[in-house]
Amino acid sequence: MAYGLDKHDLKKIITEKVEQNPDLKYYINDDYIYELVERQ
């Protein structure tokens, strides 16, 4: 039994939240998430 989110679900959640509030990307301190957001 797997727990947690799969990579695609996590990417969807993060991109939706950043699209709802674009100012969030200025407060991201994780390089991997920042890279994910910038690719959109």
Image (cartoon, rainbow, N blue to C red):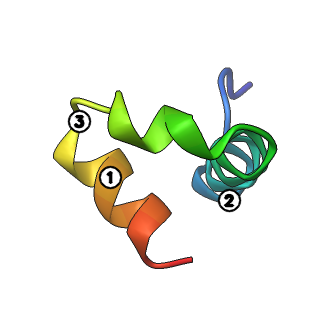
Task: Give the answer, above or below, for where 8 lies relative to 33.
Answer: below
Q: Position of residue 29 (x, y in %)?
A: 22, 29
For label 2, the residue is 8
Labels 1 and 3 touching (C-beta < 8 A):
yes
Q: Marks 2 and 1, Cα distance to the nearest angstrom? A: 16 Å
Q: Nearer the viewer, mark 3 or mark 2?
A: 3
Secondary structure of the residue carrying numbered label 2: helix
Q: Amino acid at mark 1?
A: Tyr
Which residue is most to the bottom? 39
Quadrant hosting residue 12: bottom right
Which quadrant is the C terminus positioned in? bottom right
Is residue 23 shown above or below 27? below
* Residues at marks 3 and 2 touching, judged by CB atoms closer than 8 Å: no
Label 3: few (<14), some or many (≥20) within 10 Å?
few
Q: Which residue is mark 1?
A: 34
Residue at the spot x=26%, y=51% of the render? Answer: 32
Q: Whole-percent x and y of residue 24?
A: 52, 33
Residue identified by numbered label 3: 30
- At label 2, the amino acid type is His
**Category of crowding for the residue at label 1, using alpha-carbon neighbours closer than 10 angstroms: few (below 14), some (14–19), many (at least 20):** some
How far apart are labels 3 and 2 at the CA level?
Answer: 18 Å
- Name which of mark 2 and mark 1 comes first in the sequence: 2
**Of the residues shown, which amino acid type is indicated by label 3?**
Asp
Q: In percent of the image, x 47 and y 60: which residue is there?
A: 37
Quadrant, the N terminus: top right
Q: Taking 1 as reference, is 26 left or right? A: left
Label 1's element?
Answer: helix
Please tell me in which quadrant of the rendered image residue 27 appears. top left
